[in-house]
Image (cartoon, grey):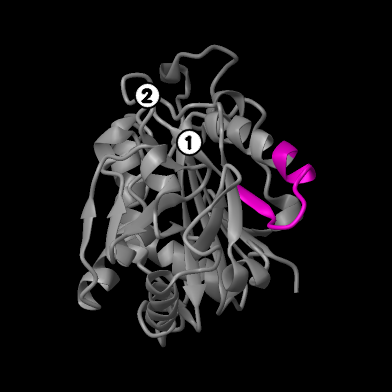
Amino acid sequence: MSTVVYLDGEFVGKDQARVSVFDHGFLYGDGVFEGIRAYSGRVFRLDEHVERLYRSAQAIMLSVPYTPAEMRELVLETCRRNNLRDGYIRVICSRGPGDLGIDPRNCRGQATVVVIADKLTMYPAAMYENGMAVITTTTRRNSPTALDPGIKSLNYLNNILAKIEVNRAAQAASDVPIGEGLMLNQEGYVAEATGDNVFVVQGGALFTPPTHVGILEGITRNTVLEVAERLGIPCSERVFTLLNVYGANEVFLTGTGAEVIPVVRVDDRTIGDGRPGPVTRRLISAYRDLVNTEGVEIQRMEPALR
């Protein structure tokens, strides 16, 4: 069955899912998005994702032409139409078509809204078992005084440039595969990875950078903090540098796509004993249990959207 995409009031085949070349999202990255996961017929943390989408839209003064409740239903209906039980959902809201100028006032129609539900392939299974290597990129995270990283905008060029560094380093890697890159903020503190949040474990306690250092407040990040608290693992937000990463007992990354993935080497420095540590393994197991039991049911008895 071909993938069905929701686009501005219609469900269409992916080959018919087209937006105008004058759309401000295409021309200028003027828009916001969310990446969401479905597990075992449930959409995980759907309300949190929808809330963050509207928070980002509010920050850039973008009027989404649906209520949060309607957006929530659009996500579920897109999953239904694709018979998706396990996969990835991408919600995109752009400013809509305008002219070739940058002025958003010239986008006179309503925002463009797209919902895609499809399969997802992230990191290979071996990385979750054995861990990955990461590098520190020379590309710094956007400053909140320029473009606040807390806005999940369509402009990801900052992250893409860092990812290019990761890809180039991965070509020269030998034993432990390089899968991600750490990004520092303008002051040199650890911010996040190119697409994930960062955690370190030291002395049995868990630390992750606070939002004010310039990070996206990840839904998975917050879920892991909740899970750690329930497991009795001390956890807190703390500003730290690469020195704290290099000397950590354990390091792992979190993200909607990545879930919880261990890091065993950073900038050619072995983390701990070079294997995923016990705290990381506990959190991986607990997180997987959670996503397969919690979430909004995709199927329902009421008539579907038309």
> Which comes before the other along the chain, label 2 or label 1?
2
Please name the amino acid that badge 2 sits on.
Answer: Ser
Residue visible at 37% across and 19% down in the picture = 146
- Find out whether residue 171 is within the magenta segment: yes
For the residue pair 180 and 3, the one nearer the viewer reads as: 180
Please name the amino acid that badge 1 sits on.
Answer: Met
Across and down, in percent, residue 171 comes to 79, 43
Residue visible at 24% across and 45% down in the picture = 238
Mark 2 or 1, closer to the camera: 1
Instruction: Report the magenta residues as a range.
Output: 168-180
Across and down, in percent, residue 180 comes to 59, 48
Q: In this view, does 80 lie to the left or right of 124?
A: left
Instruction: Tell me if residue 88 can be seen.
Output: yes
Residue visible at 21% across and 70% down in the picture = 229
- Name the residue that disc number 1 marks: 183
Look at the picture and state if 111 lies above or below 260: above
For the residue pair 238 and 74, the one nearer the viewer reads as: 238
Q: Which numbered dot is residue 143? A: 2
2 and 1 marks in contact (CB < 8 Å): no
CA distance for labels 2 and 1: 12 Å
